[in-house]
Image (cartoon, helix red, strand yellow):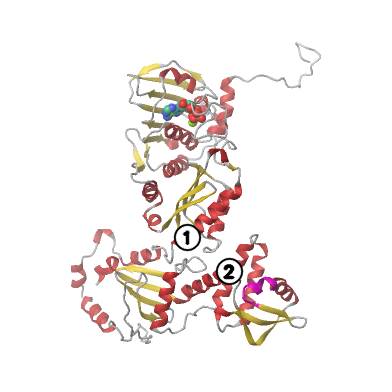
Amino acid sequence: MNVENPNIPPNRPVIRQLDDAAANRIAAGEVVERPSSAIKELVENAIDARATRIDIAYADGGKTLIRVTDDGHGIPQDQMILALSRHATSKIDGSDLLNIHTFGFRGEALPSMGAVGRLTITSRVADADIGATITVNGGEIGPLKPAPATIGTVVELRDLFHATPARLKFLRTDRAEAGAINDVVKRLAMAEPHVGFTLRDVSGGGEGRITFRADPETGDLFSAMHGRLRKILGAEFAENCIRVDAEREGMTLTGFASLPTYSRGAAVAQYIFVNGRPVKDKALLGALRAAYSDFLHGGRYPVVALFVECDPERVDVNVHPAKAEVRFREPGVARGLMVSGLRHALATGGHRASSTVADATLGAFRAPETSQPSRQYQMDHPSAGAIHTAYNAQSGFGESVADYSGRVETPVVEDTPTDHPLGAARAQVHENYIIAQTTDGVVIVDQHAAHERLVYEKLKNQMAENGVAAQALLIPEIIELSDADCATLMDAAPQLVTFGLGIEKFGATAVAIRKTPAILGEVNATAMIRDILDELANLAQTQSVQDKLESILSRVACHGSIRSGRIMRGEEMNALLREMEATPHSGQCNHGRPTYVELKLSDIEWLC
Ligand code: ADP
Ligand code: MG
């Protein structure tokens, strides 16, 4: 029985107003999930304050110390206490939640951190002679004191979650938390190439160890962005990416995307930003996949850093407490921009294939750094003379090139001008690889893979116009099939006509192939139809019609292309090289692998 009021049963809950400290601790659960999320909030505050240099220090995975120092505009002394109270912000006035130009606007980060850790803010504005400092510990705000300070702000968060020990248990190892911090800082640094960042692990005390440093980039936006991405994603990405610059209905897409031949086995390096905010948006990631679907196998993922910008009113950023998700007012425009912008950019990549295969090959040639061999060393080597003799015996235009098995490959007699990007064909080896000489290197082309892509691109162009031109077979080919296969094929028949394939039912369990795509020339129609049946079975689950069309066309292309094993004449090889140069996407085969490798003389010349 309730002692105060005997009529109220003892287990009925009573409604209470929570105090600010409790409310802040609850809010902190959403905003500050782990050290990296605190760092994200603090760095975003520094960027909002127009800092040009941001220094981030952390100890023990950020659990015992986080310190963010910036040279931004600072906080005036008389507003320091206000900055620490909930829903206090200088970034919006609350009248328009759709027109947000800053990272912050919720006014929750500082009070949340003050509620769950020991937070000290020291700041000075340009028009004050001295700075001020204030500490909040477990929600208790201390006195505001004058402090010597340079212009800007230092926010220090010690012992995160000491006021809420239960949450400490959810933190991962120091190493894992440090990894998350590095990731967050790099993402933010990608979006702000003109701002300098340093990230230091000060676990051992003192200046600590710099784990990431990016000086402010100069130049226009694209060169700054490219420089910053080189720093963060590596030189290999910087050399194998394409600039993206597209616009659709006032929404823009800029950034850099990898050539399809430079891909990863998982979606681990796909960075997408909306109005500067790093987001993990399923719809945009889906659009990215769609844009590359024609160039990459399901299991390969491009590397991208892409920035979508639009009027803030067209995207709602207030749908996620940590602002990791956004909602577009017109999702179709954002998706369309992503797909068409990327496809267009990839087409401008022309025949380029990534240099990574060449790099891997060259890596095998290169001596370990410590014993970089000089030319002298090569000449002194006992076998050097023998190498030179063998080389001379095999070189020269018009001579046969013998491989180690003694088999003689096609001689190449022709001498074309070598200033084409893919050079002049010099020889064919192993009946599948064209060796071409460029002005400054050697190119090795996989003739089957390259030609398959060329045929595929032609088929797609024909599809885009009036459908693939068909040629009637003099004698139709009859294929016996199972009932199920027959039905599948006849269902697809109206679609296959547009691919240049004329198929008719022939009795109960057979079909007659009457037409094949003209571009393929003479082709084994039965084998092609069986392949298409396999593809149709594979595709049963696929959602997108576009994906299906592309997969089937790619199968068709395979049947019309130069087989490996076919001996090619010099003119044929050169014609193939010229066609590759003129055809977008010819640098990768239909499965996303490179169709050629280029070795620059500058990379290999020390060997000779
Ligand atoms: P929000 O960023 O959503 O406004 P915060 O709690 O993160 O909320 O910060 C509250 C206010 O404190 C900000 O609106 C800003 O005026 C001020 N502030 C916070 N950090 C900084 C900083 N590094 N430099 C200048 N002002 C800051
Ligand atoms: Mg903020």
- What amino acid type is highlighted by mark number 1? Leu
Task: Measuring from the top left, give residue 84's x and y in whole percent.
Answer: 49, 22
Q: Secondary structure at mark 2?
A: loop
| The stretch drawn in magenta includes residue 124 | no
Q: Which numbered disc flags the more N-terminal residue, 1 or 2?
A: 1
* Circle 1 residue: 346
The foreground one among 608 and 559 is 559
- Judged by its main secondary structure, the magenta piece is helix
Look at discs 1 and 2 and give the one toward the viewer. 2
Q: Name the residue located 67 percent from the left edge and 86 percent from the top edge.
A: 476
* Circle 2 residue: 465
Q: In which image quadrant can residue 50 be found? A: top left
The foreground one among 134 and 165 is 134
The foreground one among 165 and 240 is 240
Q: Secondary structure at mark 1?
A: helix
- Is the CB–ligand 1 distance for label 2 below 8 Å? no
In the rendered view of the protein, which quadrant contains the N terminus? top right
Q: Name the residue located 49 percent from the left edge and 25 percent from the top edge.
A: 114
Task: Measuring from the top left, give residue 190's x and y in whole percent.
Answer: 42, 45
- What amino acid type is highlighted by mark number 2? Glu
Q: Name the residue located 38 percent from the left edge and 55 percent from the top edge.
A: 238
Q: In which image quadrant can residue 380 be found? A: bottom left
Region in magenta: 493-501
